[in-house]
Amino acid sequence: MHELLGPLTRIAEALERLAPAPAKIPDLNAADAFIWHPDPDVLDPVHQVNRVDLDLLKGVERVRDILVDNTRRFAQGQAANNALLWGARGMGKSSLVKAVHASVSAETRGGLALVEIHREDIPSLPRLLKLLRGSARRFILFCDDLSFDADDASYKSLKAVLEGGIEGRPQNVVFYATSNRRHLLPRDMMENERSTAINPHEAVEEKVSLSDRFGLWLGFHNCSQDDYFAMLDGYVARYGLKIGPEQLRAEAVEWSMTRGARSGRVAWQFIQDLSGRLGQPLH
């Protein structure tokens, strides 16, 4: 017996080294925002979120108010919907999510946290929900630029998590996503499904039904010139930039023409350029 004790001990120690380390329980109060990193599963706290104030987002007042109301109800423990912010590029979809979170989180004194999950990490979403489920804190899961290609089947796991799974979405979690596509799928992919399937309606319905899991569809449309100027006026007033209104508009129009578009992103890029030329930092 004593002769076997040494080899058995070494075998046990070797098996222990091969065994995966137990999952580390994250501190869900470490910050008001986190980034999810799978493999290994880690919630990385973000202490300084890159965002703009809610009142600087112009031209999106209607969708802003809807998202604020939905988020406020959720933070107060009432029923709320998952939200899909879709539409024109550069019109502040992701900026609105971060700004709304900051505003409502301040109202609840940090009771609402933002967790960003990257598009490629969607298959790990069930593991993330397992970590968040049961926490006294409430969480907005945020995925920026969510879309799926023809050979990507991970949308099925997202569908199950949002509504269709056995456990379903935890009551302390809501899912917000942004996308340039209303149905999260490229149009040519949907048309191809229709043309090659025995039952075209059923072939498309499974993929399109993903967007149906979002109770709120908030559309963002191309920027008018008035909205573009309103964005610029808001930034100039906030940061105290020394420039006359006529010069501001003339330079901003020229800037947008070189970019071939007007949008919130273009307006902010112009303001950054203007700030540098004037030597007036954006603080």
Image (spheres, grey):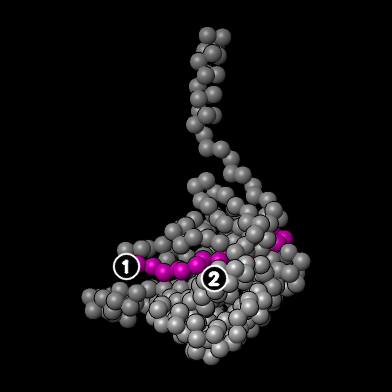
Residue bearing mark 2: 277
The local secondary structure at tag 2 comes to helix
| 54 w.r.t. 35: above or below | below
| 52 w.r.t. 35: above or below | below
Give the prevailing secondary structure in the magenta stretch.
loop
Q: Which region of the structure is painted magenta?
A: 135-149
Residue beneath the point at 61% across and 44% down: 24
Q: Magenta stretch containing residue 107, yes or no?
A: no
Mark 1 crowd level (few <14, some 14–19, many ≥20, 10 Å Cα): few
Give amino acid for label 1.
Ala
Q: Residue 99, how many percent across, how many down?
A: 63, 72
- Looking at this view, is 138 or 177 the one in front? 177
The local secondary structure at tag 1 comes to loop
Residue beneath the point at 51% across and 66% down: 143
Residue beneath the point at 29% across and 76% down: 188
Q: Is residue 235 left or right of residue 264?
A: right
Using the numbered discs, state the Cα–Cα distance from disc 1 to disc 2 in whole angstroms. 45 Å
* Residue sitting farthest toward the top: 3
Would you say residue 175 is visible in this rendering? no
Residue bearing mark 1: 150
Which quarter shows the C terminus?
Answer: bottom right
Which quarter shows the N terminus?
Answer: top right
Mark 2 crowd level (few <14, some 14–19, many ≥20, 10 Å Cα): few
